[in-house]
Image (tube, rainbow, N blue to C red):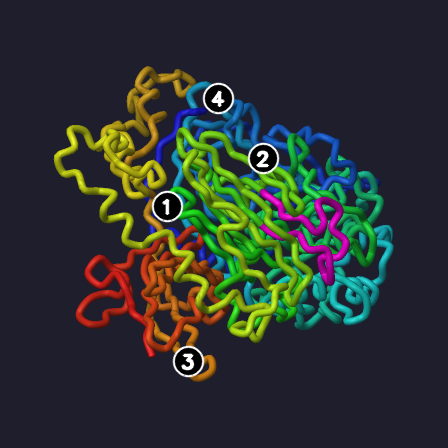
Amino acid sequence: MPPQIYSSGKTEEKEAMKLHLNIHVFVLNILFVFSTTTGATQANLRHRSLTLEDFRCRLYRQDNLLIDPDATISSSSEEEGGQTWLCMDDEDGIYYTFENLPDGFFSNPEFISGSSVVTFQKVYVSRMAGSHERSVIRWNASSQYIHTMDGFLSDDVANAIGERNVLIVRVVDKDQTAPTSEMGKLSADWFSDDGVNAASQFRDCSGGQMTLHPAVGEGINDGVMQVFLDASVDNLPSPSVENMVTDKLAEQFAAFNTNTTNIHHIVYVLPQAVDFIEGAASYAYVNGKISVFHDTFASKLHAQMQTISHNLGRGHSGEGSDVYGDGTGVMGAGSFADDGPRMCFNAHKNWYFGWYNNVEIDPTEESWEGKLVGVNDFASGEVSEESMSDVAVVVRFKNLPHGNSYYYLGYNRQEGMNSEVTEYANMVTLHVADDTSGSQQSKLIGGYEAGAEHIIPEYDGSNPLVIKVCELKSWTPDYARVIVFINDGSNDFSCDTKRTNDDEPSPVEPSPVEPSPVEPSPVEPSPVEPSPVEPSPVEPSPVEPSPVEPSPVEPSPVEPSPVEPSPVEPSPVEPSPVEPSPVEPSPVEPSPVEPSPVEPSPVEPSPVEPSLPAMNIDKFQPIIQNKGNTNYVGKVKVWLKDEDGNKMGGVKVSAKCTKQSGKSAVKSKNTNSNGIATISCFKVPNSQTITVSEIELERVGYAYDPNDNVVEDGCPIFSDGCPTKILSK
């Protein structure tokens, strides 16, 4: 990896950039000088001489949908098939590409598209004057960089909740070369109620929680605006034409006084004559606004879904070494038809969209048995409110052998808006992905039928983790019953240990969907066991795994955490409290190209966490929903705001809900555009209580501190002083 230094972001700079966003968030307001020479068909290419300087820009990842998934990207900025990194100057909106970067530069998992701001030190910068070509940042032997997390330029970036307006830009050049589809057809291909398109499929896949609408304004007809270029686009590379369109679009926005803050996505449709990058069908900026299509691919459902999802922060879905190899969702393999294939997203993408009931488990603490339901049944309302707490669309758990990633379980039910999945239909699927953000590529591990199992060796350091599909049931809703447990040689947990028996008559179960209200109590793995497990204050070594424990069945679920070697490890690794100074290794250095003997110090990871804008719980409300005369469902409703008092949409809110019997589950929900989320915990008898604790808020580019939450009973809710809330009748 190249030398790097980390430092916190600057609030005043961020605010200035957000003001600047009003002009540049959708378009790159670049002023180009066109050649006036007779017969000239494209811009003059003039390089300013290279200058050695420090340069600050915002990283964006450009994800490409290749027509041939086996093709490769030749760009010098490319790190992985289907992806290209660029850097945008926040001052003028110009995108820069890179030259001579060290191998693996963009493998840094802390880089988040649209939020990472990098200050490149001692790099050569070549700005293209009078050209629509990319400007260049050139790395050299003495270069290094400072990385900060600055948050997204717009609050609605990557927010998959609520209404989102889309502008389709139909591009016509000076020779009247234009896309195949006229304006009316482009509008219908994206928004019409007839047939299947991006608007209908996102509505169905989200259960109506996210909807696409045609943008409105002067010069916009049914969501489509035409842009007329002053040059020919014949055989021009697509980045050059993209820049031309951006320039012309900025002029039209200014002329029409367009309110761009109400436009969430801008879709460029380029003519067939354009030389599209590496034979791609389309490409889009991750956590950005712009996507670019090659002519008729703008009408293909698979391309529409994938590019808008890139804007929303989702990456590709692969299998093995194939970037697009996952056929269980739209972010992987697919075909190019106008109305298909009809499929939604894999378990990893569903977790981050936050449209469904998702559960996080810790198999080292407790074995898990439960029902997975498909997205169609959940989104179409087949899961009743009473059974909501007993089913999940996604189950996530830590990949302990590789602690920076998670596993994701889902039921890939082939029906409705997910009826044309191309792989592992009607099976339980397992994916793995890096934990740093939802824009990471996921990898499909496999699909499993009833009776099949997947084993992860040495999951807890010594014992394997077993994932077993007990049954696949056609019901209302259809479900897969799955168990997840660590096989330590004494665990008798199996598909027969806990049964729902939905198909067997039972006088106490009027509804076959209900998993029996009395089931939890006999099933509980002895809630009082943990206390006798830790009898031993006299134990000579806390690292010992309790050799005198009489019960090999319980390997002390609490022990793993103290056993962890050196919980304060990060602190001794801290290289330097004087971190800023390694940035300037030699103020009197005569040659900027000199490698600087003191540079190795900034290579060390920074002890200082980047300073992020804060978010908190501004209001909290417990909800008790009566279910008959004897039971109730406990819920919590939260209102979130940022440090400036703005409503926080698109935040994943997670809460640990614990029954009086000791059974607990982590429930998650995303906030809507008003910053509100309602989490449903459990249905319990009226005489019992539910404890809500460990609230977590997650949104890329923001920090959460419980001490900033609304104060109740003398202290901030869910802080160390007030860690729980009790729900009761």
Question: Counting residues from the N terminus, which is met first, the one under dot 3 or under dot 2?
Answer: 2
Kind of residue at disc 3: Thr
Q: Is residue 458 above or below residue 699?
A: above
Q: Secondary structure at mark 1?
A: loop
Kind of residue at disc 1: Glu
**Residue named by callout 1:** 365
Q: Position of residue 105 (x, y in %)?
A: 50, 28
Kind of residue at disc 4: Asn
**Residue named by callout 4:** 140
CA distance separating discs 4 and 1: 50 Å
Question: Counting residues from the N terminus, which is met first, the one under dot 4 or under dot 2?
Answer: 2
The disc label shown at residue 97, or none: 2
Please tell me how crowded label 1 is: few (under 14), some (14-19), or many (20+) other residues with Cα within 10 Å.
some
Question: Counting residues from the N terminus, which is met first, the one under dot 3 or under dot 1?
Answer: 1
CA distance separating discs 2 and 1: 47 Å
Residue at (16, 32) in percent of width and height = 539
**Residue named by callout 3:** 630
Residue at (33, 76) in percent of width and height = 687
Question: Counting residues from the N terminus, which is met first, the one under dot 4 or under dot 1?
Answer: 4
Please tell me how crowded label 4 is: few (under 14), some (14-19), or many (20+) other residues with Cα within 10 Å.
many
Q: Which residues are magenta?
A: 410-430
CA distance separating discs 3 and 2: 64 Å
Q: Secondary structure at mark 2?
A: strand
**Labelled pair 3, 1 in contact (Cβ < 8 Å):** no
The answer to which image quadrant residue 236 occupies is top right
CA distance separating discs 4 and 3: 72 Å
